[in-house]
Image (spheres, rainbow, N blue to C red):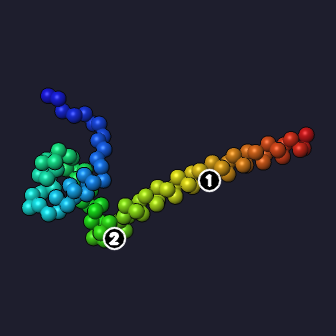
Amino acid sequence: MSKQSNKSRRYTAEFKRDAVELALASDKTVTEVARDLGVSPEGLRNWVNQAKTDRGQGPAGALTTAEREELLRLRRQVRELEQTVEVLGKATAFFANRRTK
């Protein structure tokens, strides 16, 4: 038995978009469409749900793809700013100690 291990595969945005459209247009279940495409049923289900959210058809409070990307960008920026503040604080303390000596 040579089942694929838990390796994560990357799919292009175009592939995901086409898979979602196929799943939404098909009379088959998401699981059947996923099996036909050779992708994880849960993965395809996630793509479909995210596409619905992006179209304004998702549950209340769900983040669109653009909102998720912005949130990641802002979190990264906050981390960088916190590191900058920490470095500046240490530099200030260092130079303050040098002056008092």
Q: Quadrant of residue 57?
A: bottom left
Point 17% across, 29% down: residue: 2
Whether residue 19 is visible to the viewer of this picture, yes or no, is: yes
SS of the residue under disc 1: helix
Point 31% across, 71% down: residue: 56
Please, is residue 96 above or below residue 57 in the view?
Answer: above
| Disc on res. 68 | none
Whether residue 45 is visible to the viewer of this picture, yes or no, is: no
Does residue 48 appear left or right of residue 87 in this picture? left
Distance of mark 2 from mark 1, alpha carbons? 31 Å
Q: Can you identify the residue that label 1 sits on?
A: 81
Nearest to the observer: residue 35 or residue 60:
35
Percent coordinates x, y for residue 16 in the rendering? 26, 54
Point 12% across, 57% down: residue: 29
Percent coordinates x, y for residue 32 in the rendering? 11, 52
Does residue 18 appear left or right of residue 53 in this picture? left
Structural crowding at the residue carrying mark 1, measured as other residues with C-alpha within 10 Å and reported as few (<14), some (14–19) or many (≥20) = few
Please, is residue 87 above or below residue 67 in the view?
Answer: above
Query: Which amino acid, by three-letter code, is at mark 1?
Result: Leu
Percent coordinates x, y for residue 72 in the rendering? 46, 55
Please, is residue 97 above or below residue 45 in the view?
Answer: above
Q: Can you identify the residue that label 2 sits on?
A: 60
Query: Which amino acid, by three-letter code, is at mark 2?
Result: Ala
Nearest to the observer: residue 21 or residue 53:
21
Point 28% across, 62% down: residue: 51
Residue at the far left: name it. Answer: 27
SS of the residue under disc 2: loop
Q: Quadrant of residue 90?
A: top right
Does residue 98 appear left or right of residue 10 in this picture? right
User: Comparing marks 2 and 1, which lies closer to the viewer?
Assistant: 1
Residue at the far right: name it. Answer: 101
Percent coordinates x, y for residue 33 in the rendering? 13, 53
